[in-house]
Image (cartoon, helix red, strand yellow):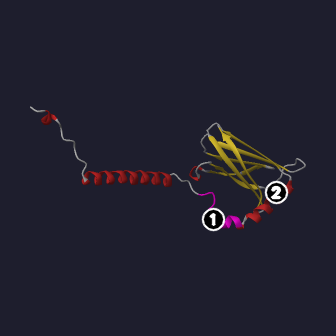
Amino acid sequence: MTDTAKLKVPKQLTGRAVLFCLFGYFGLVFAANGALVFFASSTFGGLETGSSYKAGLQFKQEMQSADRQASLHWKVEGRLTRDAAGQAVLDISVRDDKGLAVAGLSGAARLAHPATSRLDHPVALEASGAGVLRGVTAAQAGQWELILDLDRGGERVFRSRSRVTLK
């Protein structure tokens, strides 16, 4: 045998192989992009506001409400604990600038999840004494944003947003 017979002829790169490589590459890129779009859109919990235009129109009204709230000089304290059944219990105490309990209030609260609105928990508050409101909900442990609205005579007189930790 001669030396030339032992040499293998290298495979040649054909146009068909290049075409299949290109289709495979771009197919992989499209599949990855499709998966990323699917997971991003399926885990998006919603917007903070439905219409930024309408929220902008209400900004002046919200500023006036905040000024009225500040002029009340109320001291509002909240406590978020767990009861024996594992429910989250929210106790709210409202005092005026003289330290007297503020009566005639109703309200609602919401434990807003910081990442997605799908995990939010509304808390119906009931008066349990003069200036004292209480609500119960089933919420997991973790950090929450407590959004508290207090009403008197059907009009909101107090709003608070604060970060709380539920154990």
Q: Read off the residue under disc 1.
A: 51
Q: Which callout, 2 or 1, points to the residue nearer the camera?
A: 1
| Residue that appears at 76% across and 62% down | 62
| Residue 131 among those drawn in magenta | no
Q: Read off the residue under disc 2.
A: 69
| Residue that appears at 63% across and 65% down | 51
- Label count reads 2
| Residue that appears at 21% across and 42% down | 10
| Residue 49 among those drawn in magenta | yes
From the top left corner, tell me how far across and down residue 85 is, in percent: 61, 38
Secondary structure under the numbered disc 1 in the rendered image: loop
Q: What are the residue bounds of the magenta stretch?
A: 47-56
Q: The C terminus lies in which quarter of the figure?
A: top right
Do we see residue 14 in this rendering? yes
Q: 17 or 157, which lies in front?
A: 17
Task: Report the amino acid beneath label 1.
Answer: Ser
List the single residue furthest toward the top. Answer: 1
From the top left corner, tell me how far across and down residue 71 is, in percent: 86, 57
Q: 153 or 68, which lies in front?
A: 68
Which numbered disc, 2 or 1, marks the residue that appears first in the sequence? 1
Do we see residue 87 in this rendering? no
Q: Residues within 10 Å of mark 1 (few under 14, many from 20)?
A: few
Q: Residues within 10 Å of mark 2 (few under 14, many from 20)?
A: some
Residue 25 relative to residue 132: left or right: left
From the top left corner, tell me how far across and down residue 9 is, in percent: 18, 41
